[in-house]
Image (cartoon, rainbow, N blue to C red):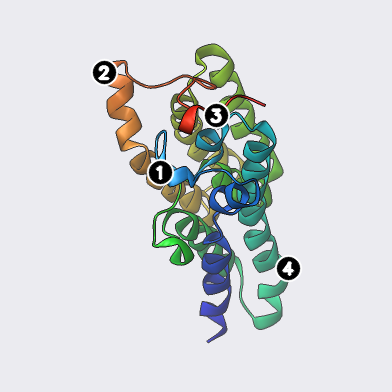
Amino acid sequence: MYTAIFPLLAYLLGSLSFAVLVSKLFGLPDPRTFGSGNPGATNVLRTGRKLAAALTLGGDAAKGWLAVFLAQHFAPSYGLGDHAVAASAVAVFLGHVYPVFFGFQGGKGVATALGILLALSPAVGLGVLGTWLLAAYLWRISSLSALIAAAVAPLYALLSFGFHIFSLTVLGLSLLLVWRHKGNIRNLLSGREKTVGSADRPGGMPPE
């Protein structure tokens, strides 16, 4: 019974779409209705509201971190170990991607995955974040940066955890993240992918 509690709570936590919630708070259009249609920080940024995008990014990362943190600290009290933590990590990611509260139309999971990695291992999380920032600086394409970071994350995890359930978890999350970016991959190959901060604001919204 207890084995299912932590992944279930993690999934429900992951289902809180901060892009949608923050957009409602700021009186912005639903991020699923413009731009890329992805309820994530990058698409919220297309409204020109940088604070809303930052809150979305922070909220999505925080829920990934919190789900894993809670499993790490409370699962052992119920006789559960690393498998419960790994299951919670996958569940919170799936909650973000397929949120039960928002018609199973979720984001791509980049920020949530980062939060998960920071909870599993700050070194791995910071390494992946550094890789994303470097790629974003060089190419200014959010999706490409995410794909590069996803590609190196399993290697960082293997170096940190060795052949452990957490390494397998990171590999699974990376594969899911790449799959969620399949449309972006097509755009990258055709040269149609937008750069970070490019226009395409809904309703002609001005920048902040």
Disc 4: which residue: 73
Q: What residue do we see at 52% from left, 62% from top?
A: 15
Where does the C terminus fall, quadrant-wise?
top right
Left or right: residue 147 compared with residue 135:
left
Q: Residue at x 56, y 60 (%)?
A: 16
Task: In this rendered view, identify the residue nearer to me: 106 or 122.
Answer: 106
Where is residue 198 shown, x and y percent of the image? 50, 20
Q: Position of residue 46 (x, y in %)?
A: 52, 30
Query: On the picture, is 205 further left or further right than 67?
Result: left
First in sequence, mark 1 or 4: give its number: 1
Whether residue 168 is visible here, answered yes or no, is yes
Pair 1/4: label in front? 1
Q: Nearer the viewer, mark 2 or mark 1?
A: 1
Give the residue type that dot 3 points to.
Met
- Residue named by callout 3: 205
Label 3: state its secondary structure. loop
Q: CA distance from mark 4 to mark 2?
A: 46 Å
Cβ atoms under marks 4 and 2 closer than 8 Å:
no
Tell me if residue 108 can be seen: no
Q: Amino acid at mark 4?
A: His
Q: Earlier in the sequence, mark 2 or mark 1?
A: 1
Give the mark, 4 or 2, whose residue is nearer the N terminus. 4
Q: Which residue is mark 2?
A: 190
Please tell me whether mark 2 sits on a helix, a strand or a loop: helix
Work out whether mark 2 precedes mark 3 in sequence or the reverse, and give the earlier one: 2
